[in-house]
Image (tube, helix red, strand yellow):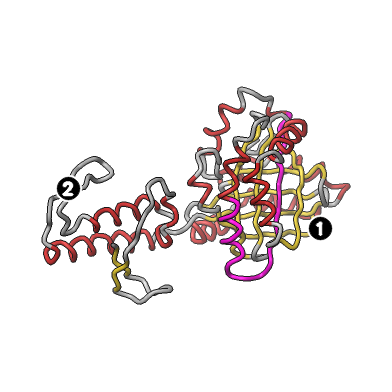
Amino acid sequence: YFYRHTSSGMAKNSIVRLLLRPGASAHILGPHASFPNRGLDLHRKLTCVNSGAVRPSRAGVPFPNRIPLNQTFSTIMSSEVDKEQSFAQRPSALVELREYELRPDQVNAYMKSTSVKANLRKSLAPLRLFTLPETGGTLNIATHLYHWTGGHAARNKGRAAMATNSDWKDYLKTVKGCMVRQCSNIFVEAPLVHNFDEICGLEMGRAEEALATDRQNDDYRESIYEIRRYKLKLGYETVPTFLKLYSDGLPSKLYAEGTDPTTSLITLLYSDVGTLNEVIEIWRHGGGTEAMERSRVAARGAPEWKKAIGEIAQLAVEFTSTIHKPMPFSPLR
């Protein structure tokens, strides 16, 4: 049982019975999705109240036997509400995808100036990936992603610092004439990114550590990034349904026999500001296009993944796949 102290979809101040099947994923706990272990701890604490059995906590420390309900419930709930409020005040990380269309005759000039000022960019903003597309869509699009751990507040502060930095303003004057248009959209990493150890994620340092082993098997100079974009039907339930289907089928794809060892899922994103109901998956293939093809062939033989994609297809109105090359100064290569 747990205490419901929010009003979304259920009456406030209600007590809810929650049954967890042994071995079930903890991220099914709804409002605790971002903090699955906290949701599980809360459930275990309250099922121990006024119980005749001694139940161990996750740390292996037994809870007291038969605690009087009237002496413990308010104390436990007060503690949990305080925790929930502290987490609610913590900003959610966001990912900014910026795409700049370059003039074909100015691509080299833009990349030269951008390379020279790469360290300045990294000092002012949390750059994670900087690429140019090779095939699969419009070319000459400078594509860069930023992982703002502190959410919108951190992004606003970072963008303000860039706007007042004299070196950055000089750089912008240099490259302004190289660009046709600029586009910025805000995404959030799907919860499954944090639930699967096999997904690198864009958090600073996490992806680098995850890819360290892969780089023993590939030459990063041959690496490519495959950016797969889904535009989904409108509706509140479309993205959650997509993520559920994707999560169910993903393990069979990740462990499909024949998958190239240099293939890694970097992240899965869904849009928050900009074009809504868009999902992006980013894969790295350290062995280049040959590694990508081997992994694709292997995935076609994964039954759960094929089933998931078949259902996902019913949600999508458009799907594109683009191959990108990371720039030498990109943190992720």
Q: Is residue 132 above or below residue 217?
A: below
Q: Nearer the viewer, residue 19 or 89?
A: 19
Quarter that holds the C terminus:
top right
Specify few, some or many for label 2: CA neighbours under 10 Å numbering under 14, 14-19, or 20 or more: few
Q: Secondary structure at mark 1?
A: strand
Q: Which residues are magenta?
A: 222-246
Whether tag 2 and tag 1 are in contact, CB under 8 A, the answer is: no
State the image coordinates of residue 191 (x, y, percent, origin top left): 51, 53
Relative placement, left or right, of 239 versus 196 is: right
Relative placement, left or right, of 314 versus 136 is: left
Residue at the far top: name it. 216
Quarter that holds the N terminus:
bottom left
Q: Residue at the spot x=76%, y=48% of the render?
A: 321
Kindly indicate the quadrant of the structure image that contains residue 222. Answer: top right
State the image coordinates of residue 110 (x, y, percent, origin top left): 78, 45
Give the residue pinned by disc 2: 54
Q: Residue at the spot x=65%, y=66% of the render?
A: 276
Q: Earlier in the sequence, mark 2 or mark 1?
A: 2
Residue 257 is a magenta residue = no
Residue type at mark 1 is Val
Give the residue pinned by disc 1: 180
Residue type at mark 2 is Val
Relative placement, left or right, of 269 versus 327 is: left
Report the disc number at residue 279: none
Q: Residue at the spot x=61%, y=22% of the render?
A: 216
Q: CA distance from mark 2 to mark 1?
A: 67 Å
Residue 233 is a magenta residue = yes
